[in-house]
Structure formats: C-alpha cells, structure tokens
Image (spheres, rainbow, N blue to C red):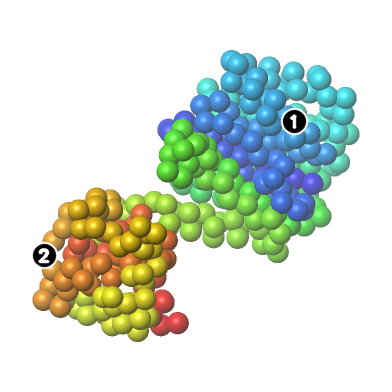
Amino acid sequence: MTYSIVALDPATGDLGVAVQSKFLAVGAVVPWARAGVGAIATQSFANVAYGPDGLALLAAGLGAEETLARLVAEDDLREERQAGIVDARGGSATHTGGGCFAWAGGRLGPGFAAQGNILAGAAVVDGLVDTFLAGGRPFPDLLVACLAAADAAGGDRRGRESAALLVVRAGGGFGGGNDRWIDLRVDHHDDPIGELGRLLDLQHLYFERPDPATLQPVDEATAGEIRAILESLGGGPGGRFESVYVPMSGPAHADEPSRPVVGEPRPFPPNWDGGWQRALDDWLDVENLEERTAAPGWIDPRVLAILRSRGSS
C-alpha cells in the first residue's frame, strides 16, 4: 500500500525518508529518523516498533543490515512486513516479506533503500532509485522528486491519499532545539506528492535566509511602490501591523537587540526612512517572513513578490 525511500545525503550527513500511500496520514506511521544515527521506513501492516527499536539499535552501533535482520527475526509477522533502513555511514538494508501484496519489492545501494508494495510494478521502485541516483537537486527536493517519479511509473495500484517527508539534521529543528529539520505531512489529498512539493517550497521560503547577492536595493521607485502597498493594507508607520507583536511587558525599548538581517545597510532614498523600514519589518513579522529580513535599504525579491501579491488581492 506504500512506497518509500530512506536515504543519506553524503555531502551533509542529513538523513531522510519520503513516502506516499493510499492510506490516511502515512507520515504518522512510516518515517523514523535520528540525526547521526539513521533513517527507517516501516510499512505493509507496519510494525511501528521498528522505528524506535531500530533507531536504538543503530545508536548502539549496529549497521543497517544487522539492525533490520534483528527486527525481522523478532517479528512473528515478518512475512507481512516491509521495511528499509539506512545508517549514518551509508549502510542500507531492505526487507519484503513473502506475504506482502503484489507487486512488492525493493532495491538498495550505498546510502539508500527503496521499497514498496501493492505497486503497479517494479518500475515504481526503479523510479525512486533512478531519480535518487541522478541527483541534481537539494536533498529534500530530491526525495520529493523520487516520489513523483515513482507515481509517474504507476505508483500505488489503489491510488493516492497521503505523503510525507522527514529530514533530520543535528540542531536543524526550529531554534536549534532538536534534529527535525523538515517534517512535512500531507494527510489526505487528491495530489499528495504535488502538495508535499508545495509545502516544501514554503519551508524554503519561511525558514531559509536569502542569498545576499540576490537582494534588491530599495531605490526611490521601489520605496514608492512598497509604501503604496503597505498603505493600501493599512500598514504604514504606526499602522495595524505595528501592534500585533507588542510584548505583555509593553513596547520594545530602543536599546533591545535588533533582529538578525541579511546583507549590509545601504543609504535610504529620499522617500524612505526608519519609520517605513519598521513598518516593512512589522509586515514581515505578521507574514512569518522574519528569516528573509534584509538589511535596511534592501529587500528580498521573494518578499517583494509576496508583498505585491498581497497588494493586488
């Protein structure tokens, strides 16, 4: 009922699982991963204990093959199970029990294991693997592309319902507090892989900082456009966005540390000043675009495009 790929990014050490299924909320069942340890997919009448138990074995020093062999050996329903494991050293293993529904099978190689059941045929798993080996994309985007290729090859014979992407990186979670760098789930959708790709693009937008080389200067024409849009939204200096994030202790003091920004400040044009810069920053806060805050006098082109879309809606 499911196809998945577990993989290691050799360039960064990131570990990930991508999965699609005709099953509600597959992301709550199949993918498991821990930074510096490994990634696991457990499916086909999934034994969810494979996740935490397998990660514990990997953390204790066992490789992917030995870990999967031990999990399977201790499972009375091993013939109905399917699983894939990759460890932090790039070792991989996959298991398809003889009781899994046809077509079922898997492929593995250094740094990846791909598997699926109730598939249109072997070409579905080939789509996962061939796309992964071709590379050419950032690791999270590559894993979603693997799912898309598998779907194009016929995918799950029953259809589509849910998809998920889990990528772990040490300190990669929000605020650096855990390793859950990317954890996206589409629980019920007519096009779960397409929706997963859309969410991944939003992940890049909201949580990645722009390249300083791509920043656009706030010249006189751009400043005039931004002012007009913010005014149309009621968001000029002292406008409705300013009061959204006032702390319970009262307005922030001038000596409080400023937010991190990308780039170095440049002189303002004559129709732009600190008040308008703060108004723009307030709007960025409300739109959850804080990570894309540019130094005064600059703006991220993606931010400008979103601002324009808000102004025209």
Crowd tier of the residue under label 1, counting other residues whose Cα lies within 10 Å: few below 14, some 14–19, many 20 or above = few
Q: Position of residue 123 (x, y in %)?
A: 71, 45
Q: Are marks 2 and 1 in contact (CB under 8 Å)?
A: no
Q: Position of residue 65 (x, y in %)?
A: 67, 20
Q: Amino acid at mark 2?
A: Pro
First of labels 2, 1 by sequence position: 1
For label 2, the SS is loop
Q: Residue at horizontal 52%, vertical 45%?
A: 182
The residue carrying mark 1 is 49
Q: Residue at horizontal 75%, vertical 53%?
A: 24
In this rendering, the count of numbered labels is 2
Q: Residue at horizontal 58%, vertical 43%?
A: 166
Task: Name the one closer to the observer, 50 or 178.
Answer: 178
Label number found at residue 36: none
Label number found at residue 267: 2
Q: Amino acid at mark 1?
A: Ala
Quarter-wise, where is residue 267 in the image? bottom left
Q: Position of residue 16 (x, y in %)?
A: 56, 38
Q: Residue at horizontal 77%, vertical 57%?
A: 159
Q: Position of residue 305 (x, y in %)?
A: 36, 71
